[in-house]
Image: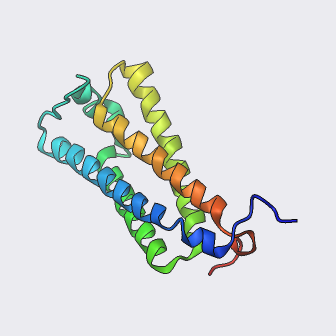
């Protein structure tokens, strides 16, 4: 009798395209964070096209963490994500999926806090900030799915 939760290495490799999709999504996140960083540094209007609270959110006291603009931290986060995802796709080292899942899980928690601040405290919405939160959630779900697809005999190895 086989366990329906386990998968073979061949089945896992057939899902590697999800890694490429995650790379593309991380690039979109990087572009989003780059745009917000540029407007923050240059002190220009964000230019919200759906909601009209972007400038309120991106210039609030909550827009920095330890004096660093959150958008700049976002650029670093997405750059790291891109590098780790690319390394995973090229090497197929399963342990990277575990660490990516942890990274994206922490990003989702951080994003949840920022979404709370937007909605409950500032009572404004920044569509670019919400997009970044959604991107982190999608990346988390993709890597969680990949992590659960790793053959059970290989989850604890550094292959």
Residue under the image location 58 percent in, 61 percent down: 146
In the rendered structure, the answer to whether residue 4 lies left or right of residue 75 reads: right
By what rule are the colours in the image chosen?
rainbow
Name the residue at the front extreme.
Answer: 1
For the point 56% across and 76% down, the residue is: 93
Question: Would residue 157 be visible to someone looking at this image?
Answer: yes
Image quadrant of residue 3? bottom right
Percent from the top left, x then y, of residue 153? 75, 74
Query: Residue at 17% across / 47% down in the picture?
Result: 38
Q: Answer above or below: position of 64 versus 120.
A: below
Between 98 and 117, the one nearer to me in the picture? 98
Reply above or below: 11 against 30.
below
The residue located at (44%, 68%) in the rendering is 84
Instruction: Name the quadrant of the N terminus.
Output: bottom right
Nearer the observer, 144 or 108: 144
* Residue 68 in view of the camera: no
Quadrant housing the C terminus: bottom right
From the viewer's perspective, tell me whether residue 38 is left or right of residue 129: left
């Amino acid at each position: 009798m086989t366990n329906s939760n386990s998968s073979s290495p061949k089945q896992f490799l057939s899902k590697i395209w999800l890694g490429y999709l995650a790379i593309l999504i991380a690039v979109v996140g990087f572009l989003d964070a780059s745009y917000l960083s540029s407007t923050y540094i240059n002190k220009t209007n964000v230019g919200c096209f759906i909601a009209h609270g972007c400038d309120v959110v991106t210039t609030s006291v909550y827009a920095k963490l330890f004096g660093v603009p959150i958008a700049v931290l976002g650029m670093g986060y997405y750059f790291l994500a891109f590098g780790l995802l690319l390394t995973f796709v090229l090497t197929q080292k399963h342990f990277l999926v575990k660490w990516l899942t942890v990274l994206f899980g922490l990003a989702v928690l951080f994003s949840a806090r920022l979404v709370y601040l937007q909605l409950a405290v500032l009572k404004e919405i920044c569509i670019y900030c919400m997009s970044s939160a959604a991107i982190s959630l999608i990346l988390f779900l993709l890597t969680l799915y990949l992590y659960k697809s790793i053959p059970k005999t290989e989850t604890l190895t550094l292959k």
